[in-house]
Image (cartoon, helix red, strand yellow):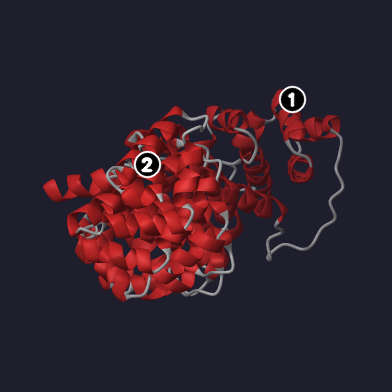
Amino acid sequence: MACTEARLSRFKNKFRDPAKLREKRIAMCVKLRKDQKNEHIMKRRKITLSSLPDEEISCASIEDIVRDVNSDCILLQIRGCQAARKLLSVERDSSINEIIIAGLLSRFVAFLSMEDEPTLQFEAAWALTNVTSGTSWHTKQVVDHGAVPAFIALLSSPMLHISEQAVWAIGNIAGDGPVYRDVLIACNAVPALLACISPDTPLGFLHNLAWTLSNLCRSKDPYLPGSVVQQMLPSLIMFLHLSDKNILSEACWAFSYLSDGENDRIEVVVRTGIIPRLIELLNHEDTCVMAPALRTVGNIVSGSDAQTQVVIDAGFLEVLPKLLRHSKSSVQKEAAWALSNIAAGPSKQIQQLINCGLFAPLVELLRSGDFKSQREAVWAVMNITIGGTVDQMIFLVRTGALEAIVHLLQVRDAKVVMVILDTINNLVMAAEKSGETEGLCRLIEELGGFAHIEMLQNHENVSVCKAASHLLDKCTEGQSWFLL
């Protein structure tokens, strides 16, 4: 417990409220995944199943749709549902609103139970799926009309395309948030989804199942119940060992959600034994796989020292230099974030960073990365100066980190400037212990650091002003060379 508390005290919270920091991380993760989810929904809305002939999309009027759907003729009902789902595939919220206002949802839901009319079932399911891809209010209307039990029942349909359409709809509902996720769980959607997975299930269907399970894992307020996680883990682990990039991507995103939380949640993922596989996937050629694998690993190394060491022992540090130098800045940022989490650990783990040559690419990122990557790299450097030994900090300075962060004192982000000032202060304190204060201060002066720090005394942020003044006083006190 003491070890964990010490680690958390070093993890990027010197000048931030830890709770707010975690909220920001979660919000960012959810936003990224929501963007990904929206992209998937649009793809599904435009998909024509391979078992069906290609068709031209010609939209009927809402009046014609209402007339056909409300008729007593099966053929007209099918035509009306088909016209509705085509309209919803082309138009967005306005058409969804028209369908709802016309009172068609209750008819669509009723059609889902007509086992003797699979074509009508399918068209109604597709139309409802498109409604659930709209806003949260649109999804609520579908749920409130009793569609959830009907979709779950369709999962066992002998018609594969009908079962798959139900998976899409359930995935859309699950992705809307914890309220409807819990509705699905209460209706036993998870066992029904898992029952669709078999050696004979086509890859495309497996992809949709993986996407739906991932959406079930996504919401975190509250987290997915542990009993449900245990139900899903065997299938998610199986997905993680397939070769299809789309399935791999969804499985990695699912594990990224499951590992984004307290150490006990991280431990559930660690105990699955998937970390070596995640490290393998960091070398995947497609970033749609590599990025969520990296996010998962980054989550795990934000846990306890023991959990972090499992990742290190699996070979993460050997892959990390390449990720820090990746052509995509988003990957560089995630890699730097993961490195900063490791750097928040004990000096033993910091030494492993040194042994694997991580300081050089870290400094490169400080010098030439985009600002988001630089910001994560700055945190990594500060964490090293908090938990590292004097020798490790000397090596950090010799690698060029001090020069790089001094240059970044000119950025406008007050929080980053505060972290840099704190980092320099940590280096000065370490120099005091080894009797190297004057040498370090001379180096800061040669790098133009004191000129920047003096200017920061006039910064618009009061905390920056105070920190800059305090650091100048500390470095110049009794140093006659500074007056030369």
As displayed, is residue 18 above or below residue 483? above
Q: Position of residue 415 (x, y in %)?
A: 45, 39
Q: Secondary structure at mark 2?
A: helix
Amino acid type of the residue tagged 1 in the rendering: Ala
Q: Which residue is mark 2?
A: 472
| Residue 60 visible in the current orientation | yes
Q: Which residue is at the front of the view, 18 or 278? A: 18
Identify the residue at image location x=37%, y=76%. 318
Could you give the CA–CA distance between mark 1 and mark 2, rounded to whole angstroms?
71 Å
Q: Please state the total of marks drawn on the protein image.
A: 2
Q: Is residue 405 left or right of residue 344?
A: right
Q: Nearer the viewer, residue 481 or 46?
A: 481
Residue at 74% x, 25% y: name it.
Answer: 102
Q: Residue at x 41, y 38 (%)?
A: 468
Question: Looking at the image, which is closer to me, 31 or 116?
Answer: 31
Image position, residue 422 (x, y; %) = 35, 44
| 381 vs 174: above or below | below
Q: Residues within 10 Å of mark 2 (few under 14, many from 20)?
A: some
> Which of disc 2 and disc 1 is earlier in sequence?
1
Image position, residue 213 (x, y; %): 44, 52
| 42 left or right, relative to 438 | right
Residue highlighted by disc 1 = 102
In the displayed orientation, state which residue is furthest to the front.
484
The three-letter code of the residue at mark 2 reads: Leu
Residue 304 percent coordinates (x, y): 22, 53
Mark 1 neighbour density, 10 Å: few (under 14) some (14–19) many (20 or more): few
Describe residue 144's horizontal placement relative to residue 432 as left or right.
Answer: right
The residue sitting at 69% across, 30% down in the picture is: 104
Q: Which mark is residue 424?
A: none
